[in-house]
Each structure stands twice: as structure tokens, then as C-alpha cells.
Amino acid sequence: MSTDNTIFERRESEARSYCRSFPTRFTRAKGSEMWDAEGNRYIDFLAGCSSLNYGHNDPDMQAALVAHIQADGITHGLDMFTDTKAAFLTAFEEIVLKPRGMDHKVMMTGPTGTNAVEAALKLARKVTGRKNVIAFTNGFHGMTMGALAATGNAGKRAGAGTDLEGVTRMPFEGALEGVDSLSYLEQMLSNPSSGIDAPAAFLIEPIQGEGGLNAASKEFLQGLQRLAREHGALLILDDIQAGCGRAGTFFSFEEMGVTPDLIPMAKSFSGMGLPFAALLMKPELDIWGPAEHNGTFRGNTHAFVTARVALEKFWKDDAFQRELAEKALLLTTGLQAVADEIPGATLKGRGLMQGVDVGSGALAGAICARCFEAGLIIETSGAEDEVVKVLAPLTTSPALMEEGLGILLDATRALTDNNKIAAE
């Protein structure tokens, strides 16, 4: 197979990004490993930005999808009733919703997370009759116009080419040194001269995936829920990257004592990396008219097949969740060893969504580049790309996790010991 990559430079848009950090041509993947056209093996600590929580090509999902295709199963059905959708919804109801005391309805949206966020914003405004949405510093919610308005990253926002409206920005928990973000928000909302319009919703990621792995506390999320109810607003918890087990439980907000009104889901919701997004909503909020929010690819029939298998295989009991707790401890221990090599470095995130703030985007980038040279795929996060972020598949074996963390530690030591890069 040719490894000449000039076709990409000649024909693919300059918007491409990940290939710039990982400049090789990948040809095969299984579990937590990938191989390129030259036969080089890589440990995957990126997992499609948490779209592959159950690893590459899970054999049970793969077999079910192949069987569905070979049996001439429905490929595309708009939002018509199908056997695969019924099976998925039944599994989701029985395995996820009922055990958690949730009665949310499932709205199939377009296939990406940003569409689920757009649907949440539209519905919150429709339900409340208000326009303003309160979002938070360092948040990332998508690249379409409504979701982008709620996104904090300046570089992403600049791509809009026009005004981004309808959002008031507030500090995420711990974003401002010496400032109690919840108290600040409460005071602003209670002051009739603050200039903040009554909100339709609060939109927040319980763990900020792109914003630096900032994790909201139980107290902060409970406070937001209280404020939402006091001010007649809805609470939207964006669980697109942190959900489906990434934080250690199926939803990242479990054990936090909150029940979100709206929950955008995507990424690993399909189980196998297939495009699939949905909005979970409390039943009383489902005031849509038929096709009031739609899309040609609302509901991916192939994803229904693999998503059902993922639920049945990993979430029917608590065995998988117990494994995640053990792996989270292993990850924390490994990352602490990395942090110990860098003065002032700190751990960020929780569950299987953790990283190390090394204090410098230059250092974090250099560490990730050196890791790639040694066979580990890993990326950065944060406002200045200062966090080395681990998003390994949740199914990664302890031995493979330790091997990847060893590569990360070696890369960090090589750079810091030789003083090749200094933290800014």
C-alpha cells in the first residue's frame, strides 16, 4: 500500500487537524491499538476523542453489525419505526434509565454532538420563551452557530465569521482565583441591574473535555440546579465527551445529586464509533411539533445495532463500572508519576478522563509529539493546550494502560531531564 500522503495535502481542506499531530496513514485498529501502513503499532490514548470508549472494532458489536447488513437490514430510515430502533430504545430504557430513576425521553438528532446541543438550546428557548443561555468559561459545545456561541475557545469562535449571540458567559468553578463562581453567579442573577437577561438555561459540561479537564464538584452542580429552579431556567448537562462511562459511571453526573432537564449525548453513544447523537429530555419538556427539529440522518440505524450491544454487554450489571474504578486508580497513579517530574504540575479531571496540567502548551505539545514517536497517540487540552489528556478506551487492559503510561513518563523525563523544553 502506498504511504504517499500528498493526496491529502492536495485535496483535503486545510481544516484538517489531527493528522498534523499524527502524520502517518493508519490502516487497522483493534481494541486499544492501531497500526499504520508501514506496520508500526500505536497504543491509542485518544479513542476518537472519547468516541471509542469500548475500543476499536469490539467483536460483539462488529458481529451484530455485519449480521444486520448481510441480512439486508434497514440502512436508513429517517425517523420511521424500525426493529433496530425499538431494540435500542428498549435496552436503553431497561438498562440505563430505569435503574437510575430517570424518565427522560430520547430525541434523535443529526449525527454529531453539536446537533444535540443545538436541539437542547432550541428546546430550552421554546419551553421558557427566553433567549439568554448561561454558558461557562472554557466550555466546548460544538461548531455550529448556536453551540459555537456557547463555546469559549477564541480560535473556534473566530471561524464563525459573524456575531455569536444569545449567551452570557460565567466563570466555571475555580476559573477565577479567589472567586466563588457559584456565589458570583447567584449574585448576578439576583441583581436586577446586573444586565443579565433571565436565562432560558444553564449549559455546562460536568467535566470540560476540550477546556482543560476542569471537573465540576457535586456542590457546584447542585447549586446550578437550585439556581435554575429558582430562576425558571432549565439545566442542560452536556455529557457528549464525559458520558458513556468515561467519568466512571454511565452518566458523568451520577452520584452528584442532580437530575438534568436536558442531556445532549453523542460520541460513544453508538458504542462503536458510528455517528449517533441524541437529546435526552424530561417528558414534560417534549413540546416539539412533528419535524420542528429534524434532519435527514436523525437516528443512525447501524448505530442502533451497535449501541444496543454496548449496553447489553457492558452495563447490564455493575461489573464493568467496578473495573472502571480500578482503572481510574491505575491512571491516577501513573499520571501522578508524570506530574512529579514537572515542578508545579497538577492532575486534572476524574474517572478515565484525566490528564496532567504541565503549565505550558509548548511542553505539553512536545510531550505528546515524543509519545507519538514512541508509539503512543495522545493529545493536549486546555485554553493554552497545557494539559496532556488521556482518553484511553475504557476497555484498555491494565497491562496496556501501564505500557502507555510508561511511554508518557519516559517522554516527560526525556524532555524535562534534558531541559529541551521549559514550562512557560
Image (cartoon, helix red, strand yellow):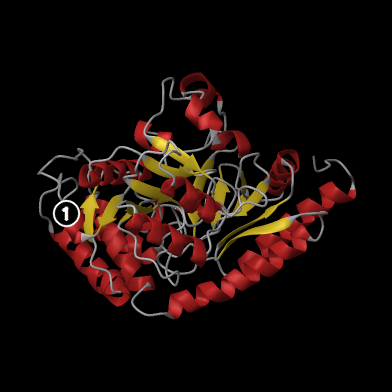
State whether residue 114 is above or below residue 28: above
Depth check: give the residue in front, 400 or 223. 223
| Count of numbered marks | 1
Q: Which residue is drawn at 34% across and 52% down?
A: 231
Q: In which quarter of the image is residue 133?
A: top left
Secondary-structure class at tag 1: loop
State whether residue 320 is above or below residue 58: below
State whether residue 246 is above or below residue 132: below
Depth check: give the residue in front, 156 or 376. 156
Quadrant showing the C terminus:
top right
Q: Which amino acid does label 1 sit on?
A: Gly
**Dot 1 surroundings within 10 Å: few (below 14), some, or many (20 or more)?**
some
Q: Position of residue 45 (x, y in %)?
A: 58, 55
Q: Where is residue 86 in the image (x, y as percent from the top left)?
A: 15, 62
Q: Where is residue 56 in the image (x, y as percent from the top left)?
A: 46, 56
The residue identified by callout 1 is 73
Res 416 visible: yes
Q: Which residue is drawn at 90% across and 46% down?
A: 418
State whether residue 363 is above or below residue 325: above
Depth check: give the residue in front, 371 or 298. 298
Q: Is residue 6 left or right of residue 128?
A: right
Res 44 visible: no
Q: Which residue is drawn at 76% across and 64% down?
A: 337
Depth check: give the residue in front, 79 or 372. 79
Q: Quadrant of residue 92?
A: bottom left
